[in-house]
Amino acid sequence: MSAIDDLPPLREVIRRHSLSARKSLGQNFLLDLNLTARIARAAGPLENATVIEIGPGPGGLTRALLAMGARHVIAVERDERVLPALEEIAQRYPGRLEVVCADAQDFDPRPWLGSTQAKIVANLPYNIATALLIDWLSIEPWPPWYDMMVLMFQREVAERIVAHANDEAYGRLGVLANWRAETKILFDISPAAFVPQPKVTSSVVRLIPRPAPEVCDRRTLEQVAAAAFGQRRKMLRQSLKSLGVDPARLVAAAEIDETRRPETVPVGGFVAMARELTHIRNP
């Protein structure tokens, strides 16, 4: 493990502050500074960038972001035990690290950003990772206050995020994510890199917001995808009945056959069905 700054190794920081990862907070500390630096580099040039980091823990990724030149890192952490360790990093990089003690699910960064766009870079707590992503993909109005997300998920969740039609992992999350963003799995991280070791491989995913996704109402799109994938083994003519309209009108608008199953329908097909559903409900 190579040093990225002159601060103590993370294992020493954890030992000195008597830190231990808490399962209730979804914590798994990533201690390899080579890997944290790789994650930071994946966010592109960081000079003059503002970065939102969720769940910094003892600060391995935080240090990498700052060492790579991030102008301002806003680290959102609900675990008060790690605040002294983060304060040591703030002293090493004066004026560039701001630690906000808050629950990420209740945190609105816009008052901190003003008119500045940010990047979201994080080793997300596993227990809230998907919920946070959906919140960030559901921001209105669009485009959002961030121009990139580089996030770590369990491999299974990462596969669902990037999945397209005919992929085994394709579902509601893939429809929403790929409607609003360009998605890509960048690399995997072994369980052995974490303390404690999780039982699954992790993956780093990059999402770049599409400036102008195909036009449709987001909530309606989510309803159509939920109805279709709620009975994913059934044909659309059956699964879409739960929406309370004639499925034939929806599939006709998407120019697809009503005997198809949802995993074969591309994102554009779901968008077309959502637009038609909006038209039926609001003629």
Image (tube, rainbow, N blue to C red):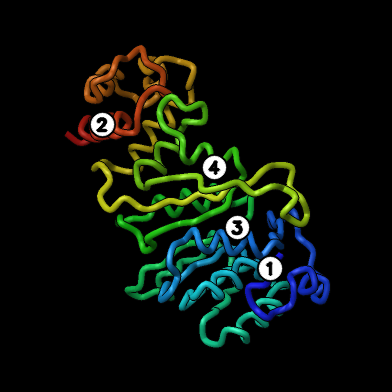
Q: Nearer the viewer, residue 221 or 53?
A: 53
Q: Residue at left 49%, top 75%?
A: 69
Q: Residue at left 78%, top 70%?
A: 14
Name the spot of residue 177 as percent of width and height, x first.
41, 43
User: Which residue in the protein does label 4 denote?
Assistant: 158
Kind of residue indicated by mark 2: Ala
Q: Residues within 10 Å of mark 1 (few under 14, many from 20)?
A: few
Q: Residue at left 57%, top 52%?
A: 152
Q: Nearer the viewer, residue 94 or 47?
A: 47
Above or below, 249 against 28 in this view is: above
Q: Quadrant of residue 20?
A: bottom right
- Measure how far apart labels 4 and 1 are at the Cα level: 28 Å
Mark nearest the camera among 4 and 1 is 1
Of callouts 3 and 1, the N-terminal one? 1
Label 3: state its secondary structure: strand
Residue 2: mark: 1
Q: Is residue 154 left or right of residue 49?
A: right
- Measure how far apart labels 4 and 3 are at the Cα level: 13 Å
Label 2: state its secondary structure: helix
User: Which residue in the protein does label 2 denote?
Assistant: 272
- Measure how far apart labels 2 and 3 are at the Cα level: 35 Å
Quadrant the N terminus occupies: bottom right
User: Which residue in the protein does label 3 denote?
Assistant: 123
Q: Is residue 113 left or right of residue 125?
A: left
Mark nearest the camera among 2 and 4 is 4
Kind of residue indicated by mark 1: Ser
